[in-house]
């Protein structure tokens, strides 16, 4: 099968891109490391190591656009050891095929800022993850400057939406809320904080892959108007027609939680994002390609629907497992 679009990573972003491409009638190949996933009909899955240049060069053959949505586990050691070779392998595949490479990035590289983040801001991160993200972005953007590859970067804030689980506005917010329990949020809930809807992130990356003038530049994904985390949570509970129940967690609670939840510990060095206003300026993208942002209420409604299906599927699996459990056998 020849696929004109190759998506590295089968997480929430990769799946959102794939669903949108399939709806457009595109041929898509998805690549991950070790697991099979439920894919839309007609999408090919290739399992392999994206840090292996021979593998990526083969899997990218015939591609017009390559989407880099892959990443190691959310731990700094994993990032240091795995992220650079992963990126180099994907870049090698794009170079060999002549495809455009569109990279899904975060805002970590800017560090702690006092004003809305723009694409022309310098990388000033002092955290380990921030410095790593900045280095990865710089390496990628050197490719179009030297003529080696056509690369563009789509940069998003904390995202939420269908398939998004391990996020500050993910499963620890939506699942408890759906169960009538307090949603768990972090930091100062009353500060403005930009959130990105995963569907808009995917749409922005597809647009960048279609437009030649996007190449060689960084683009901030358009977002619905920035509100506070508390306002986002209130929208969620309004859509659920339930009274708002919120547990806010500060640094101390996150530090305690990090003993049991590795992701919580890893979030601590980025906690400044939730102690200060965290606002994204995406006017550059809007002026060039239009405002594609989904209103938060609509996006939250879509996310609720996905989580309801997700919880139903989990319940069905648990029921199936119980049906096939063997009874305990007592021996004398």
Image: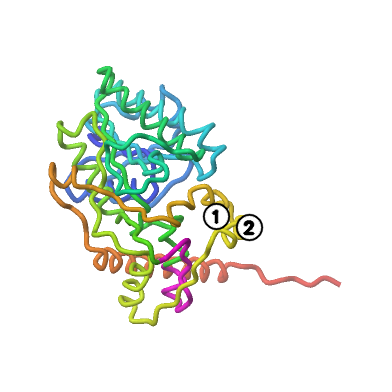
Q: Which mark is residue 260?
A: 2
Query: Measuring 51% from the left and 38% from the top, which residue is drawn there?
Result: 128
Crowd band around label 1 with a 10 angstrom C-alpha radius: few (<14), some (14–19), many (20+): some
Percent position of residue 290, x then y: 13, 48
Disc 1, disc 2: CB below 8 Å? yes
- Compared to 14, does 65 lie above or below? above
Q: Quadrant of the N terminus?
A: top left
Out of 128 and 83, give the one closest to the viewer.
Answer: 128
User: Residue 80: within the magenta?
Assistant: no
Magenta-highlighted residues: 174-189
Query: Measuring 51% from the left and 71% from the top, which residue is drawn there?
Result: 319
Crowd band around label 2 with a 10 angstrom C-alpha radius: few (<14), some (14–19), many (20+): few
Image label count: 2
- Compared to 182, does 192 lie above or below? above
List the residue tagged with mark 1.
264
Q: Is residue 275 left or right of residue 119?
A: right
Q: Quadrant of the C terminus?
A: bottom right
């Amino acid at each position: 099968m020849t696929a004109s679009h190759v998506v590295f990573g089968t997480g929430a972003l990769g799946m959102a891109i794939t669903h949108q491409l399939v709806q457009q009638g595109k041929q898509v190949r998805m690549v991950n490391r070790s697991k099979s996933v439920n894919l839309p009909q007609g999408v090919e899955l290739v399992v392999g190591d994206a840090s292996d240049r021979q593998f990526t060069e083969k899997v990218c053959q015939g591609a017009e656009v390559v989407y880099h949505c892959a990443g190691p586990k959310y731990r700094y050691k994993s990032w240091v050891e795995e992220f650079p070779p992963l990126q180099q392998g994907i870049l090698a595949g794009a170079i060999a095929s002549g495809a455009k490479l569109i990279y899904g990035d975060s805002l970590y590289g800017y560090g702690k800022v006092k004003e809305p983040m723009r694409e022309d801001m310098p990388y000033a991160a002092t955290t380990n993850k921030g410095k790593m993200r900045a280095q990865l972005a710089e390496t990628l953007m050197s490719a179009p400057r030297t003529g080696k590859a056509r690369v563009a970067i789509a940069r998003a804030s904390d995202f939420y939406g269908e398939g998004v689980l391990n996020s500050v506005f993910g499963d620890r917010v939506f699942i408890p809320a759906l169960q009538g329990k307090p949603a768990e949020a972090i930091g100062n809930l009353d500060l403005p904080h930009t959130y990105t809807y995963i569907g808009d992130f995917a749409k922005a990356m597809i647009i960048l892959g279609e437009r030649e003038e996007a190449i060689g530049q960084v683009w901030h994904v358009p977002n619905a108007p920035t509100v506070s985390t508390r306002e986002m949570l209130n929208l969620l509970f309004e859509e659920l027609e339930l009274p708002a129940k919120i547990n806010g967690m500060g640094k101390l609670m996150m530090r305690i939680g990090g003993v049991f939840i590795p992701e919580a510990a890893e979030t601590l060095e980025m906690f400044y994002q939730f102690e200060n206003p965290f606002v994204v300026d995406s006017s550059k993208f809007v002026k060039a390609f239009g405002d594609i942002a989904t209103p938060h209420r609509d996006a939250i409604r879509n996310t609720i629907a996905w989580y309801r299906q997700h919880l139903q599927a989990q319940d069905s699996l648990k029921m199936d497992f119980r049906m096939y459990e063997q009874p305990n056998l007592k021996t004398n």
